[in-house]
Image: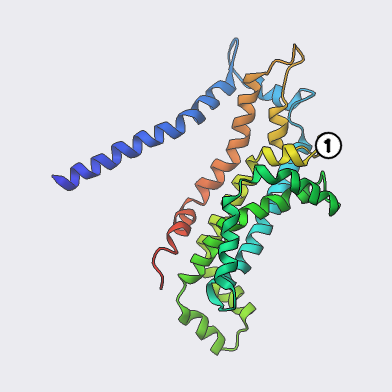
Amino acid sequence: MKPRNARWGYYVTGTALAILFLFPLVWAGFASVRTDTGFGLENYDRLFTSANGVQFRHVLNSVVVSALTVGGTLFTATLGGYAFGRFRFPGRDVLFLLTLAILMVPYATILIALYVLLGWLGLEDSLIGLSLVLITFQLPFSVFMMRNSFEAVPVELEESARVDGCTSVGTLLRIMLPAVRPGLVTVGLFAFLTSWSEFFAPLILLNSTDKFTTTLAVVNLRTASHGSIDYAALEAGVVFMAVPCLVLFAAMQRSYVRGFTSGAVKG
């Protein structure tokens, strides 16, 4: 009876947590289609057609920032994780700890300094500059995840590849990357979720309205009457922003879970 009671406890707890986390999404979906006369898509129509609503360029800006952030994070974290996980060099542990130390710095406190730095580099008010900032603050988690993923791969695979004549780069591309695919999916998914839904960094680093991301466009959605907020259209914007995240998470859920557990047991 004990195992069955334990299973029921897991089911009840899991159901309660699912309801707790899903309720805001369900409520937002319900509010986004509710109108004064019933239900319909009028709120979505105002979201995309009003003068200060979400324009195609805003969505395109978000896609560009997300693509640059995901690509840059995967490239940098893969090389960094491979170096930390497979090579021995002076100062390796100190450098790794310094990378993790970025987590201790609330990025909101240094955004102004980063804005000035981007100005020196000629990247102020640019999607590339915003992407570089987002990549920087993705690196601690991403490098940590990729290092664990590489360390979980048996050393014998790498040694066999080198015996067959593979260089370090060839081993990384042909042997290691397929073996750490769950870790890559996890890092890429986190980078996308962060960059797609980020609000504070674009608010500080972007000045031109034509450079605004979707999050800024949704927040700026207001009616012309005394600056009041069109909450129904905002709920439609929330749903629009959440759909890509939900679809990607559902499609990559298995690899995402495996990525978190890949470094738990080495070898």
Q: Helix, strand or loop at disc 1?
A: loop
Q: Is residue 255 above or below residue 45?
A: below
* Furthest-left residue in this view: 1
Return the x and y of residue 182 as percentages of the image width and height. Answer: 50, 60
Return the x and y of residue 121 as percentages of the image width and height. Answer: 84, 54
Asked which quadrant contains residue 228, the reply is top right
Point 25% across, 40% down: residue: 9
Asked which quadrant contains residue 239, the reply is top right
Q: Is residue 262 above or below residue 234?
A: below
Quadrant containing the C terminus in the rendered view: bottom left
Rate crowding at label 1 as few (under 14), some (14 to 19) or many (20 or more) other CA atoms within 10 Å.
few
* Furthest-top residue in this view: 37
Which residue is tagged 1?
208
As rendered, which of 205 and 224 lies closer to the eye?
A: 205
Disc 1 marks which amino acid?
Ser
Return the x and y of residue 104 as percentages of the image width and height. Answer: 57, 51
Point 62% across, 48% down: residue: 192
As rendered, which of 50 and 192 lies closer to the eye?
A: 192
Point 56% across, 79% down: residue: 88
Instruction: Specify whether residue 120 is in view.
Output: yes
Circle count: 1
Quadrant containing the N terminus in the rendered view: top left
